[in-house]
């Protein structure tokens, strides 16, 4: 095996390992890891004795605080921000070294920037997934509030019950709201702050109903039950729409991956092809046109498959 191919395989393994760790950290093992961490399960281990103190120092920096906030929004609990930063730096450097051995320096830098953008975009993707999960929990939230208020409980108590019964991300946001209410924040102000943290039309309608009921009264139980049914219907409709457009969206990404994979295959069959392609004017023009068409195609697919319900 040639050194260039070995470096390429190593870079691919590092990138896949980084993405795999992040996706695993957002899975079902999060809750168990939190319990172990809170109960001292990390004591005596390498992570608990060495990495955890370094991570505490890292999150005191401006970048560390911003990354920790992104981790919280993405519901990543088993992976430290410091670990993600180190793995990301190693992956980006590996991508640059491999790319620099195959293409010119300019394109190697572009690939390194693309790898860095991809690692940051991964957190954004996980954050959007949490946002969609929160929206999917709104029917359950409205149902819990309706049942609690119909039993004679106040809105504050109903929100506490919902916070204790619902899983993340709705449970996390409701716990934040409960903490704000416990220090004297008016309930309408607390609800409006939650709406600012998680903007969305469905949540705005639900919070508007609660705020209006808190300020001027009204039939809250009937409104919440009707809203729960409406949100459940919207949820089912959105699921059916996503099922219909998944194939078209997936096909677009497969075409891009197939094109890039075919180019790498040609380079493997004819070593030096990528370098010749990126160092000649004709090759650069071909790459530019190809990249533009891929971007336009993906934007069009995203635009066509984006349905507002």
Image (tube, rainbow, N blue to C red):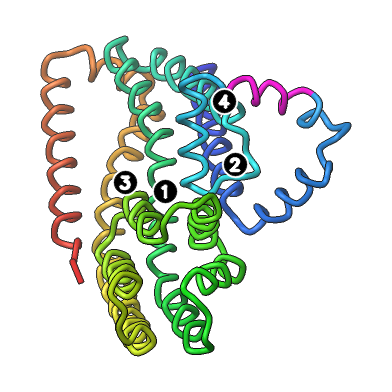
Identify the residue under disc 2.
Answer: 21
The residue carrying pointer 3 sits among few (fewer than 14), some (14 to 19) or many (20 or more) residues within 10 Å by Cα, namely: few
Q: Magenta residues?
A: 50-59
Query: What is the CA distance from the residue labelled 4 to the residue labelled 2?
Result: 20 Å
At 20% from the left and 54% from the top, the residue drawn is 302
* Element carrying mark 1: helix
Which mark is first along the chain, 2 or 4?
2
* Element carrying mark 2: helix
At 59% from the left and 26% from the top, the residue drawn is 82
Identify the residue under disc 4.
Answer: 59
Q: Determine which of the numbered discs, if any, sits on residue 127 in the image.
A: 1
Q: Is residue 126 above or below residue 161?
A: above
Which mark is first along the chain, 1 or 4?
4
Left or right side of 179 for 241: left
Left or right side of 163 for 251: left
* Element carrying mark 3: helix
Which mark is first along the chain, 3 or 2?
2
Q: Determine which of the numbered discs, if any, sits on residue 258 in the image.
A: 3
Q: Between residue 254 and residue 203, name the one nearer to us.
A: 203
Q: Position of residue 116 (x, y in %)?
A: 40, 26
Which mark is first along the chain, 3 or 1?
1
Which mark is first along the chain, 1 or 2?
2
Please state which of the two labelled residues, at mark 2 or mark 1, is closer to the viewer.
Answer: 1
Please state which of the two labelled residues, at mark 4 or mark 1, is closer to the viewer.
Answer: 4
The residue carrying pointer 4 sits among few (fewer than 14), some (14 to 19) or many (20 or more) residues within 10 Å by Cα, namely: some
Query: What is the CA distance from the residue labelled 4 to the residue labelled 3?
Result: 40 Å
Q: Quadrant of residue 212?
A: bottom left
Q: Is residue 1 above or below residue 165?
A: above
Please state which of the two labelled residues, at mark 4 or mark 3, is closer to the viewer.
Answer: 4
At 18% from the left and 67% from the top, the residue drawn is 308
Left or right side of 295 for 251: right
């Amino acid at each position: 095996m040639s050194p260039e191919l070995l470096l390429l395989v190593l870079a691919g393994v590092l990138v896949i390992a980084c993405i795999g760790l992040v996706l695993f950290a957002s899975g079902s093992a999060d809750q168990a890891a939190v319990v172990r961490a809170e109960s001292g399960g990390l004591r005596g281990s390498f992570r608990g004795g060495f990495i955890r103190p370094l991570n505490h120092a890292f999150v005191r920096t401006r970048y560390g605080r911003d990354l920790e906030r992104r981790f919280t929004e993405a519901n990543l609990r088993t992976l430290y921000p410091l670990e993600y930063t180190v793995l990301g730096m190693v992956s980006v450097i590996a991508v640059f070294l491999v790319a620099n051995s195959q293409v010119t320096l300019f394109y190697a830098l572009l690939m390194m920037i693309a790898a860095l953008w991809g690692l940051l975009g991964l957190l954004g993707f996980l954050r959007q997934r949490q946002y969609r999960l929160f929206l999917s929990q709104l029917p359950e939230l409205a149902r819990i509030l309706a049942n609690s208020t119909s039993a004679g409980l106040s809105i504050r108590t109903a929100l506490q019950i919902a916070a204790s019964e619902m899983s993340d991300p709705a449970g996390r946001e409701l716990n934040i709201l409960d903490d704000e209410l416990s220090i004297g924040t008016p309930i309408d102000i607390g609800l409006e702050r939650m709406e600012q943290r998680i903007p969305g039309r469905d949540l705005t309608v639900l919070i508007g109903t609660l705020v209006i009921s808190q300020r001027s009264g009204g039939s809250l139980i009937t409104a919440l039950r009707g809203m729960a049914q409406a949100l459940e219907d919207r949820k089912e409709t959105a699921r059916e729409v996503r099922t219909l457009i998944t194939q078209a969206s997936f096909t677009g990404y497969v075409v891009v991956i197939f094109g890039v994979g075919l180019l790498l295959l040609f380079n493997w069959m004819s070593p030096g092809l990528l370098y010749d392609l990126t160092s000649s004017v004709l090759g650069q023009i071909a790459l530019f046109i190809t990249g533009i068409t891929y971007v336009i195609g993906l934007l069009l697919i995203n635009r066509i498959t984006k349905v507002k319900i």
